[in-house]
Amino acid sequence: MTTVNELTRSYIRKRPSLKDCLAKGLINYSALSRLIKSELKDKKVTKAAILIAARRFRDELGSEEFTEEQIMELLKNAEIEIKNKVFAMVVDKSLNERILELEREIKSENGLFYLIEGSSTITIISSERYFSRIKSLLRRNLISSSQNLVMIIVKSSPQIEKLSGVVSFIYSLFADQGINLVETMSCWTDTMVVIEEKDLPLAMQILKF
C-alpha cells in the first residue's frame, strides 16, 4: 500500500517547479496540502498528513548534495558555440543506408552533419548549403523540414556527469522564455539545442550566468 509520504513525494517530484519552490522554502504548506489532497484519489489521506509529509520532504531536499547554485556555477564556466544557417529534416528510416553515405560525403568535406535516430524516423541536422542536395536525394521519404535554424552547443566540464539536473535546467530556461527547441541531443560534456534563428538573441541572454 502506498504511504502518504510516497504519495506526497511522487506528486511533488513530478512537478519540478513545485519541487524547486519547496526546496527554497517558498511554499505555503497549507495551500500545498489542499492542492495535493484535491488531486489524490485516496480520500482517506488527510491534509494534515500531507502537510507533515511535505515538511519532511523539504528537509530532505535541503540536504541534497547537488543544488541549483552548483548547476549555475558549472554553466557559468561552460563555453558556448553557435552554428548558424542550420536546417533539420525528418525522413523515413528505411533510407538508413543512403543517409549513412550522405553523412560520409558531407563529413569528408568537413561539413556539419548530425543524425538522431528514432524508432521509425531519422532526423538530419546539417548546414543550409546542403539542404537542396539532401532534399533532392531523400524527397520521396521526406516527412518534414525546418530551415532558418541555429545550433547552440553548451560545452561543460566533465563534472556534468556527476551533477544531476543540468540538462533539464537548460531546457527549463528556454521553456520559461517561450523558446521552442526544434531538436536537442547531447554527447558527454556537450549539450546541443537547435532553435529558430529569431530566438538566438534571447537565448544568448538566457545563457549568461
Image (cartoon, grey):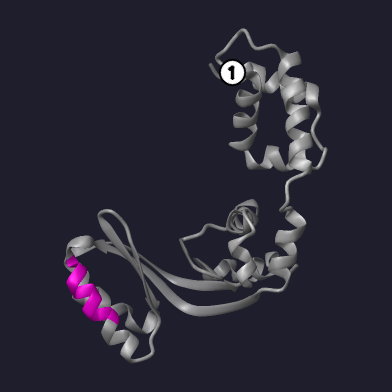
Q: Vertical placement of 162 versus 41: above or below?
A: below
Residue 73 placement (x, y as % from top left): 75, 65
Q: Nearest the camera: 165 or 116?
A: 165
| Magenta segment, prevailing SS (helix, strand or loop) | helix
Q: Quadrant of the C terminus?
A: bottom right
Q: Vertical placement of 64 versus 89: above or below?
A: above
Would you identify the image quadrant in which residue 75 lies? bottom right
Q: Nearest the camera: 169 or 44?
A: 44
Q: Residue at x 65, y 33 (%)?
A: 12
**Range of residues picked out in magenta:** 95-103
- Disc 1 is placed on an element classified as loop
Is residue 96 inside the magenta stretch? yes
Relative to 83, 175 lies left or right: right
Which residue in the protein does label 1 denote?
40
Is residue 162 inside the magenta stretch? no
Would you identify the image quadrant in which residue 45 lies? top right
Q: Amino acid at mark 1?
A: Leu
Q: Residue at x 27, y 58 (%)?
A: 121
Residue 102 placement (x, y as % from top left): 25, 80
Neighbor class of circle 1 (other Cα within 10 Å; few <14, some 14-19, many 20+) is: few
Q: Vertical placement of 174 versus 128: above or below?
A: above
